[in-house]
Image (cartoon, rainbow, N blue to C red):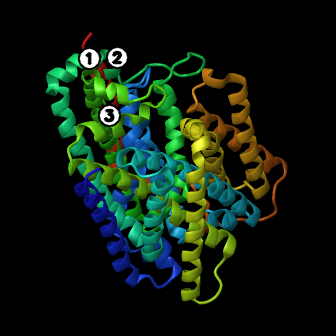
Amino acid sequence: MTLLDLAIIAGYLGCTLLLSAWLARTITSPDDYYVAGRAMPWWALALSTTATQSSANSFIGIPAFVALVPGGGLTWLQYELAVPLGILVVMVVLVPVFRGLGLVSIYEYLEIRFDRPTRLLLSGVFLISRAAATGVALYAAAVVVQVCTGLPLTASVLTMGGVTVVYDMLGGMRAVVWTDVLQMVVLLGGIAVCAAFGWTAAGGWAGLIHDVGPARLHAIEWAHGVGDGARAPFWGFLVGGFVLYVAYYGVDQTQVQRQLSARNVRHAQRLLAANALARFPLTLMYAGLGLLMAAVYARSEELRLAVPAARLDFLVPRFIELVLPPGARGFVVAAILAAAMSSLDSALNSLSAATMRDFVGSRGTPRRQLTISRLVTLAWATVITIVGIQAGSFASNVIEGINRVGALFYGPLLAAFMCGMLDRRATGPSVRAGLAAGLGVNLLLLMLFGRSLFWMWWNVSGLVVATCTCALLARAFPSPRTVPTTRGLLGATSIARQLVDVRRWALAMVVYTSGVIGFLAWLGDISPS
């Protein structure tokens, strides 16, 4: 790294701190800190949500998967197929309830609908799993910074964690959102810079077609992933991904907290719709960058020697190091930092929100609560940083399996909320039993079938088993408690009304998904033989 590169990186980090310090002037209460006074513009929240999806792992992992991973290529794009359909369900079913109740932690809903033990159980699962996943993601991003800058790994972890927690503590959700908007601009610029130099190094379109194997242009594997050994089955991604994205956007505090920061239900739905339409183009940019890097890799012996066979995710860092000139190198590293911090800041704020609302409670003056909220954010930042520093000994296994771990839990977690909203007879004990049964069956499937069952199907099995268990137990052991419809239950009339309200978005998402599937099939048809 040259002085120019370091100056660019330092300038970017300085801008994020100055922006958050300026925004801190408006923070006077926990509601300001966690949901920005419920007054954020929907377009900024949409950009922030998209930025959170694009972690440093995306910037590093997707191009490496497309370019080098055996069986990889454009099949990665299948991950995005179910996003619009999953988000449509969130818009119609979940957003009106959460936003209508004025929640800060979505787990408050479970106490309103059921009881406190159910709320604490699911909030605790979120806190532990999100802190562990964020710590590992911080480690992965720090490895990239270490390779590109020469900083020791611990210093890289501390730099990213330290800067993020400072601006998060100062500006709360406003700082998270507006710095994410800045980070999204830097991120898109970083992709463009890498693509421009990659295009030249790859020899343009002719070099790309000549050096990229035709198998990597096939984007759809028409398989189901149930015993057929398919690595990237279409139906597994479409059906399992549908459940995954309903859960991710609908019952994951890191995502829902932005919806709770919108001005009203309509704005929350609008930000989700914008995100549904933006994710595939962003992922397509990463995949296109991967194809360019595959061509550069085929042409450059120096790059091939610099990427260890056991660490294919070093492709992007080594490309930055060997291909990009000074200045461009610093800007792209800043983009990777932006991607990492956009995921870290939202995790910190949501961990703090769930801890304060679900476990600590609201005591004392608003100013005292705000001070405690900031201290809780600092405490979680410390935990995540420690996990990031210690993750080196096990990160290769955890990073590879982190999506599978999420698939074990997402279905049962979604079932808990859906049973609460759609089943009047559901009770706290039946929901908790359903959560345990769904997770237990998924673990059993993992042990019995291993890789012969594509892991995306665990989302479906967990949801079905947890829902059925809850429904059966609630009817076998009914509760005398009567839950008013206005406190978390949805009827067919309410759902139909919401669907009518978002009918244009619904039609757009169905057409959009069909168009994406057709586009991916077309890519396979035009690939050279």
**Residue 518 shown left or right of residue 364 in the figure:** left
The x and y percentages for residue 230 are 51, 19
Q: Is residue 277 above or below residue 348?
A: above
Looking at the image, is mark 1 or mark 3 earlier in the sequence?
A: 3
Looking at the image, is mark 1 or mark 2 earlier in the sequence?
A: 2
The x and y percentages for residue 33 are 48, 76
Q: Residues within 10 Å of mark 1 (few under 14, many from 20)?
A: some
Please give the label number shown on residue 287: 3
In this rendered view, identify the residue nearer to me: 408 or 499: 408
Circle 1 SS class: loop
Amino acid type of the residue that numbered disc 2 sits on in the rendered structure: Ala
Which residue extends farthest top?
A: 529
Q: Residue at x 40, y 80 (%)?
A: 24
Q: CA distance from mark 2 to mark 3?
A: 14 Å
Q: Which residue is mark 2?
A: 215
Q: Which residue is mark 1?
A: 527
**Residue 511 shown left or right of residue 436 in the figure:** left
Amino acid type of the residue that numbered disc 1 sits on in the rendered structure: Ser
